[in-house]
Amino acid sequence: MSSGSPSRAIVVVPYLNRKAAKTAGSEIPRRIEAKLDEAVGLARAIDLEIANAGIVSLSAIRPATYLGKGKVDEFAGIVRTHGAGLVFVDAALTPVQQRNLEKEWNAKVVDRTGLILEIFGERAHTREGTLQVELAHLTYQKSRLVRSWTHLERQRGGFGFLGGPGETQIEADRRMIGERISKLEREIAKVKRTRALHRENRKRVPYPIIALVGYTNAGKSTLFNTLTKAAVRAQDLLFATLDPTLRAVDLPHGQRVIVSDTVGFISDLPTMLIAAFRATLEEVVEADIIVHVRDVSHGDTEAQAADVTKILLELGINPNDRNRIVEVWNKIDRLDAEERVGIENIAARRPQEERPVLLSAVTGEGIPDLVAAIETRLNADRKVFSLELDAADGASLSWLHRQFEVLERELTKAGRLRVRVRVAPGKADLIRQKFPNAVALAA
């Protein structure tokens, strides 16, 4: 279709002007510059060369082309001037709008949903992740002309709006998509059953789960690496991490936990991807502690926090549960002295139980405060029991290790083994049934 380079892109960020936005009803307003930065970041996340990027104020959305006629003509000239083969419109385009803009600009056009799907396709590595992304992508494409994807048998991450084979055999392609969707749904059902078995096995392990959540590029993976000494991909890049990663960590007071890094959230995430990745967010739903990582150096940090809160609510999680949620204000190393004082004052004015942890995942500043906050919440509702075993009773000791957190073992003068265990809420009856002489210690 296009004579321009398929990797050279124009980024268009349309937004409703103040009057139109007020009529439409908006939540926390975002800075237009921040929206442009995010759109450019999304395009760069799949190595597109950004030839030009601009914002467009709209008084209304045009049914045929989304943008007004004048702006459509203006960007047609920009596309020609820069020899761009792709235009990323940071909005949800209908199939008709996408097709009409492609004709006007003589270039591939991809909207926000299509680009995020492409990024997810390149980032997913686990079996379920790749299946879920392909299912979401094909569901999206089924309603459109099949010009932006290549062969269904391709075994790579992305699904190819870059350099596809064109608009040949559309009906046959649509039939193939339908067949592939059915096959994917069957495969995903099998993978989910396997995940359910793994989840049940994890429940038998008495280690609490700490899930890191936050807006994409808030620094979750860097924080994960700092906490776990792991080497998960952590870059200044949107959606650098997609598949969930889990690592065991020993806290300072000896408690072992499992830390989970999850996919970053983003505003206007395609509905089909929220559904598709609900399974990968199971670690968040079932987590004992949720660490909400915010980038306080970002100008739209409040709006980003609101997006995360919205998705947590959709997952059935109460974002105001301070016994479970730890809010982290990350990247304080990027603040100048005046900004830092302001942030510290804002945090200090919050009630103690709602006070965020200020830290830098890069420098390590504030990490001990975060670990202390996690330990405090984990142990708030957990009881410690003391009991004695026959020193040769290895089976009972093994059972205690499987069910609870063993804090201490010592041999008494009488030759008995005294064991202290920390018990999760709801498991106190279990230890009392097994060991009627177990004594609950004072907090």
Image (cartoon, helix red, strand yellow):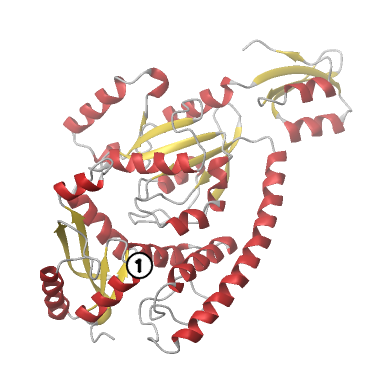
Q: Quadrant of the C terminus?
A: top right
Residue to which mark 1 is pinned: 46
Residue at 44% x, 62% y is 120
Q: Residue at x 21, y 65 (%)?
A: 62
Q: For this rendering, which residue is in front, 144 or 55?
A: 144
Q: Badge 1 local density, few (<14 within 10 Å), some, or many (20+)?
A: some
Q: Whole-percent x and y of residue 110?
A: 31, 70
At 78% from the left and 25% from the top, the residue drawn is 430
In the rendered image, the residue lying farthest to the top is 442
The front one of 45 and 303 is 303
Q: Does 231 sit left or right of 410 as displayed?
A: left
Is 413 situated above or below 406? above
Residue 352 location, x and y as percent?
39, 18
Tell me the kind of residue under disc 1.
Ile
Q: Secondary structure at mark 1?
A: loop
Q: Decide: is 149 above or below 326.
A: below
In the image, residue 335 above or below residue 159: above
Residue 231 screen position, x and y as percent: 48, 52
Seen in the picture, residue 363 relative to 184 is either above or below; the reply is above
Residue 93 place in picture, x, y as percent:
31, 66
